[in-house]
Image: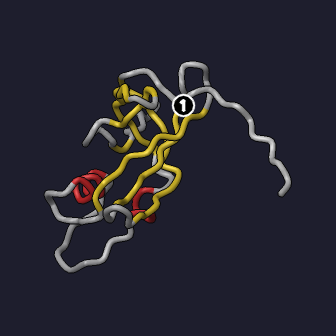
Amino acid sequence: MEDVGIEVKAPANVLDGQHTGVITKVEYRTEPYKYTDVFVETNNTEGNVVELKYGCPTSITAETKLGKLLKRFGAELNVKEVLYPAKILTGKKVTFMTMNEVKEKGTFSRIVKDSLKPLEEVSSS
């Protein structure tokens, strides 16, 4: 088997606090539970693009994490209606808070629960 060169990168951490970015994609996973992962790109203090993940259980009601997120981005949560989170969220400019979490494997930047919101553009008038 041929060996492949892999670039060494700096850790993808950002400072605690308020940030802006853009939702680049939404992915779904089923192990160990059904989860919807929302990927957000932002810049760290060195100006490098960093991708963070905001995970939500894959369940939509007015009270669930995913339901509240979709509602913040303009979705109407009508019972029995089928929603497509990727269509609603992908490409949206956002604001969010991060907090660094220290674990055995290292320090990881996490998006604070319920802080992911649409970025309100300021009009120049």
Q: Which quadrant of the rendered structure holds the N terminus?
A: bottom right
Residue at 19% over, 57% down: 64
Q: Is residue 116 above or below residue 45?
A: below
Q: Is residue 103 above or below residue 86?
A: above
Residue 67 on image: x %, y %: 23, 59
Residue at 41% over, 64% down: 29
Residue at 24% over, 65% down: 59
Which residue is nearer to you in this view: 103 or 26? 103
Q: Which residue is mark 1?
A: 12
Q: Is residue 31 left or right of residue 47?
A: left
Please identify the quarter of the rendering in which residue 96 is found.
top left
Which residue is nearer to you in this view: 107 or 82? 107
Identify the residue at the far front of this view: 1
Residue 16 on image: x %, y %: 37, 22
Q: Which quadrant of the rendered structure holds the C terminus?
A: top left
Q: How is the image coloured?
A: secondary structure
Residue 40 on image: x %, y %: 47, 44
Q: Is residue 61 left or right of residue 46?
A: left
Identify the residue at the far bottom of this view: 80
Please identify the quarter of the rendering in which residue 60 is found.
bottom left
Which residue is nearer to you in this view: 73 or 63? 63
Residue at 31% over, 54% down: 56
Residue 61 on image: x %, y %: 18, 64
Classed neighbour count for the residue bearing mark 1: other residues with Cα under 10 Å, few (<14), some (14–19), many (≥20): some
> Looking at the image, how many numbered discs can be counted on the residues?
1
Label 1: state its secondary structure: loop
Specify the amino acid type for callout 1: Ala
Identify the residue at the far right of this view: 2
Identify the residue at the far left of this view: 63
